[in-house]
């Protein structure tokens, strides 16, 4: 049977969109349960931390440059630099570091 | 919602979307290469990226399409790989104005990605949907164009440039979770625990069979749930949380 790639793409889009849109459209009220509210409060920070480490170490050519960017990024964010600054300077750290390390 | 308010939030979203765009561009080049290897054409891969905006989900989808999997198999795997968006969508449902009209909810749902979610859910107070639209307006082209470049140019782009751009996303993540961690020791502790457990999950061969999307959801649910039970937050007054 000949399958159509665009139909696959449509199916992938449809299921992804349903997953993304259902809670947002169906949950219209404030959730009052304290545990659920606390859970949702912690979710973004935990997700972002889980996604950052150790994935960052395999994102660049060498784990060393990524580790430097990790430390630099944590420090820059700690001392209040903006989202854009931290992001761009992390890229610069990797670029410069990889000029020296191969 | 006043007009100037919308415009301001949209522009702020565009500004905050730029690092996302750069990161997406770099990451999706790899995705484009994977799409090409899976036998997809440039238009197919680019359209898929513009619509689906999910790295792990698309990667799994492309791999399965190449392997000749059925429509149902691809859709089921897509649901598993993207299940974490259920959680993010739930969190956003608590972050927007309860009176927010349906059309905005339907639109916001289009662009729930890890990054857009992470940035938008962290704004103080209520979330204005125009912030998300601003981010999506720059992030989506970054993701789609990177995919296109990956399919067409593949390995022509200088490796050091792609390598450097790839950490942009992580820099953005750090600038979101570090400042609250500085103020709140519980969040700081959670970040360290998340780092440690994520490392364990990604290093021990026992967990090798679990997809990266599943790892994220398992760890997020487990750690956040334990934290919610041990350290319940009183989020009623400030509206900042949840």
Image (cartoon, coloured by chain):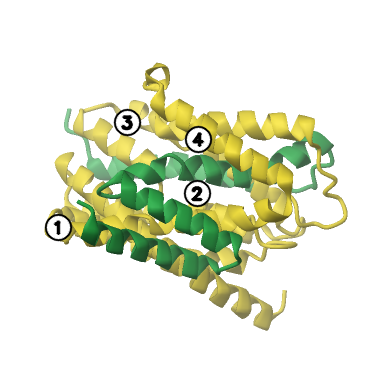
Chain colours: A green, B yellow
Q: Secondary structure at mark 1?
A: helix
Which chain letter matches label 1? B
- Name the residue beneath numbered marker 2: B114
The residue beneath circle 4 is: B216
Disc number at residue B152?
1
> Eyeballing the image, is A43 above or below B32?
above
> Quick one: label 4, few (<14), some, or many (20+) residues within 10 Å?
many
Q: Quadrant of residue A63?
A: top left
Do the residues marked 2 and 3 share a common chain? Answer: yes
Mark 1 or 3 closer to N-term? 3
Q: Which residue is mark 3?
A: B71
Whether residues under marks 2 and 4 lie with C-beta atoms below 8 angstroms apart, the answer is: yes
Q: CA distance from mark 1 to mark 3?
A: 26 Å
Q: Residue furthest front?
A: A100
Q: Assess disc 3: are there few (<14), some (14-19) or many (≥20) residues with their C-alpha within 10 Å of its C-alpha.
A: some
Kind of element beneath mark 2: helix
Looking at the image, is mark 4 or mark 1 nearer the viewer? 4
Q: CA distance from mark 1 to mark 2?
A: 26 Å
Q: Can marks 4 and 1 be said to lie on one chain?
A: yes
Query: x, y percentage for residue B5?
Result: 68, 78
Q: Where, by quadrant of the figure, is residue B204 drawn?
A: top left
Q: Residue at x 20, y 55 (%)?
A: B150
- Camera-nearest label, 2 or 3: 2
Residue B14: % across, % down? 50, 72
Label 4: element kind: helix
């Amino acid at each position: 049977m000949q399958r159509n790639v665009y139909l696959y793409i449509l199916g992938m889009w449809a299921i992804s969109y349903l997953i993304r849109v259902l809670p947002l459209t169906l949950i219209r009220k404030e959730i009052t349960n304290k545990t659920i509210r606390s859970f949702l409060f912690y979710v973004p920070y935990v997700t972002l931390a889980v996604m950052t480490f150790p994935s960052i170490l395999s994102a660049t050519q060498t784990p060393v440059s990524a580790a430097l960017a990790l430390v630099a990024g944590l420090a820059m964010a700690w001392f209040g630099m903006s989202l854009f600054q931290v992001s761009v300077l992390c890229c610069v750290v990797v670029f410069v570091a990889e000029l020296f390390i191969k | 919602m006043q007009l100037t308010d919308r415009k301001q939030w949209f522009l702020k979203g565009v500004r905050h979307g730029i690092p996302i765009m750069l990161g997406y561009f770099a990451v999706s080049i790899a995705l484009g290469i994977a799409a090409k290897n899976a036998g997809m054409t440039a238009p197919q891969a680019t359209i898929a990226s513009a619509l689906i905006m999910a790295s792990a989900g698309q990667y799994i989808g492309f791999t399965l399409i190449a392997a000749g999997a059925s429509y149902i198999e691809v859709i089921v795997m897509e649901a598993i790989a993207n299940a974490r968006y259920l959680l993010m969508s739930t969190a956003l449902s608590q972050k927007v104005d309860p009176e927010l009209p349906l059309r905005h909810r339907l639109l916001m749902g289009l662009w729930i990605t890890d990054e857009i979610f992470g940035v938008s859910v962290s704004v103080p107070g209520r979330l204005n949907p125009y912030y998300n639209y601003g981010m999506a307006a720059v992030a989506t082209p970054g993701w789609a164009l990177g995919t296109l470049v990956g399919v067409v140019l593949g390995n022509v782009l200088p490796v050091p440039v792609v390598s450097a751009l790839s950490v942009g996303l992580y820099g953005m993540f750090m600038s979101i979770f570090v400042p609250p961690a500085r103020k709140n020791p519980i969040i700081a502790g959670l970040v360290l625990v998340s780092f440690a457990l994520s490392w364990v999950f990604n290093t021990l061969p026992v967990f090798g069979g679990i997809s990266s999307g599943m790892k994220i959801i398992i760890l997020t649910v487990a750690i956040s749930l334990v934290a919610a039970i041990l350290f319940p937050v009183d989020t009623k007054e400030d509206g900042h949380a949840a």
